[in-house]
Amino acid sequence: MFPHALKQLLFLLICGFATVIASGSSSDKCVPVGGKGLSDDVPVDCGDAVSSFDSIIERFFGGGASFGGAVLSALDGTAYNDASKQYASARVPTAPSFIVQATNQVDVQAAIMFAVHCEYKVTARSGGHSYIGSSSCDGSEMPCIQIDVGNISHIDVTVLPNGSKQINVGPGVRLDELYPVLIDNDVYIPAGECGGVGVGGHMQTGGFGIFGRSLGRFNSHIAAFDIILADGSLVSVSSPQNNVTSKLNDDLWYAVIGGASGSFGVIVDITFIPINESDHFAFYWEVSFFYSNSTKHCMQNMVQEFAKMLEDESFTNDMRWNIMFSIAGYKTLFSQDLHDKAFNFAQLDFTWVENGSSDRAQSFSEAQAIYNRLFEAYTFQGSDSTCLTLDQYFETLGEPFTTQLKTKFGSTYATADDAKSMSTLHKEVTLVDWGALGLEKKGVPFTSSYQQGPQYPQADDLVKVFDLIDELMPENLTHQRLVLSQFGVLPGPSNVISNVAQPFQEDVFGVVVDVWSFDKQDYTQDQRKLQDLVISSVGGVDHRMFWAAYEDTCLECGAWEKYYESLSKYNELRRIKGCVDPNNVFKFRMSIPGMRKSDDGMSSKTAKAKSEKRREI
């Protein structure tokens, strides 16, 4: 990573490219960016990417600088295949013409300039966790380059004059790499729970997890970011300030944070202002339950009790608690090692976040009362001995299973004197390494659905959702599938971020279900039945997130309605896209299309008609 002053100086020296620095421009019109492409004196061979990158870098940066990364094609065999794999590899083709594994921002700039000159489209990957493969592309459909920024993985901590800390993070940093640094510096940033997710994608799509309702999304703690645009120029973008930041700055801030990840450029650095751990303390219960036909009524009763709690406005107005439920059908996966002892399980994640000056004992008592109410519902006030926690089930298996499984899957119970930081709790309890399952590399097909909405579900509706998830669970070893499901509260209206495109921020409840089919059976219809029920339960709206997109993914064919609140927001993003990427260099599944002049100002009805026409074509 280059210091900001050096980055700006380097770009002042670049002939034909604009250095964009935040300065006051009040125009509401499109602010064009950058230069007019590579000049003829830069030797570029579209058949030799590496030598071309070296030429581009030498031309613009000099000093003996050269390309520091790697370029992979299908001729590189296993290395290329591994690098092209995404979370959704079994779902959609992920076979880019080239993969550029960049090590710094200059590598990224060279790759983009090369792509534009040689007429390749570009997609960016930081962690590869898009459900529909947006962080890769299919070279058989169009010549395309996947720029992998996984190796741009710096983490730099700066102590500011007021004593607070600022953290600059490379887009390739994984969450499980970030949290040890946060722990060492006594700070916290709320995020999701998949440890292998890259920061570059996470910051563009939201990032909400088990502390999100109390402390906001991952991207609500961003102060600035650096992005490389389609002309190769570097733009340093910061939080908008009236009469200080430029129109370009404010447009990019709005579009990149929640607009459509990767559509506007490639992120190379993110600046966070984290939360000081001393400002809060937290309690965390993560309790796992044995799940089978004989115990599902126990979980169902706890879920129903939770829905009844959501009917109490004083409870939902209290932003200290966060609750998520998971139901995991692992029996097929575990059967390889545990055979007839393989199991499914359910899980309650409950956190309580309190102001650091509050009385710890009193706060724990309030949190404990909520946990006890849910646990007592699970056991029917202790009257049903079949309602086992997972630890209790492990006791029935005997050694060596009891000790081994408790070590790996044991529950976490909060105590009044628990002094673990939020970052420690997030790292030790929340983060999960889904990548260790290797399902994407094995090519196991999966279906998914994710819905969220602005209303809490009624008790009867949530039980029906629970029942449909239960129908998907593998009951015996002949059911060759893995089911991962989660439902619970979202950050909601108290955590709305202004001046960004992040969609549906006021939604309060979400449900996600993934089904991995080892026997290649198609569970699409089961998922759609579940989807329809969730939609009707959370407000009658079909709200989706880009990180968990599925099925209708062509935004200009009408899918935009599922990912944005309004046509005006969608068109504003298209306007910004047309400004910063007029030739649609960053094109991939679900990228934002640039605004057509003929589309400007059209009504929702007209937009839908044009969308249908494009779909026919």
Image (cartoon, helix red, strand yellow):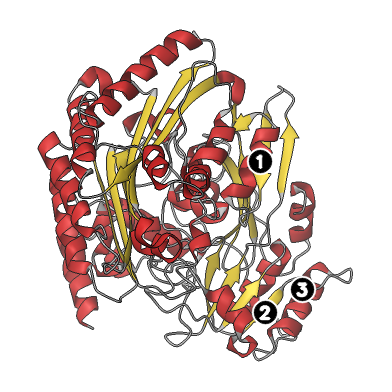
Q: Which mark, residue 252? A: none
Q: Taking 430 as reference, is 107 above or below it? A: below
Q: What residue sits right under mark 1 in the picture?
A: 180
Q: Which mark, residue 67? A: 3
Give whichever of discs 3 and 1 has the lower sequence position. Answer: 3
Towards the viewer: 102 or 482 = 482
Q: Quadrant of the C terminus?
A: bottom left
Q: What residue sits right under mark 2 in the picture?
A: 71
Towards the viewer: 565 or 356 = 356
- Residue 471 appears left or right of 492: left
Name the kind of residue labelled 2 in the image.
Val
Q: Position of residue 461 (x, y in %)?
A: 12, 41
Which residue is at a point 15% across and 41% down the rendered structure image? Answer: 463
Q: Quadrant of the N terminus?
A: bottom right
Q: Nearer the viewer, mark 3 or mark 1?
A: 1
- Bin the neighbour count of mark 2 within 10 Å (Cα to Cα): few under 14, some 14-19, many 20 and up: many
Residue 304 visible (yes or no): yes
Which residue is at a point 69% across and 89% down the rendered structure image? Answer: 48
Q: Taking 272 as reference, is 607 above or below it? A: below
- How many numbered marks are there? 3
Name the kind of residue labelled 3 in the image.
Phe
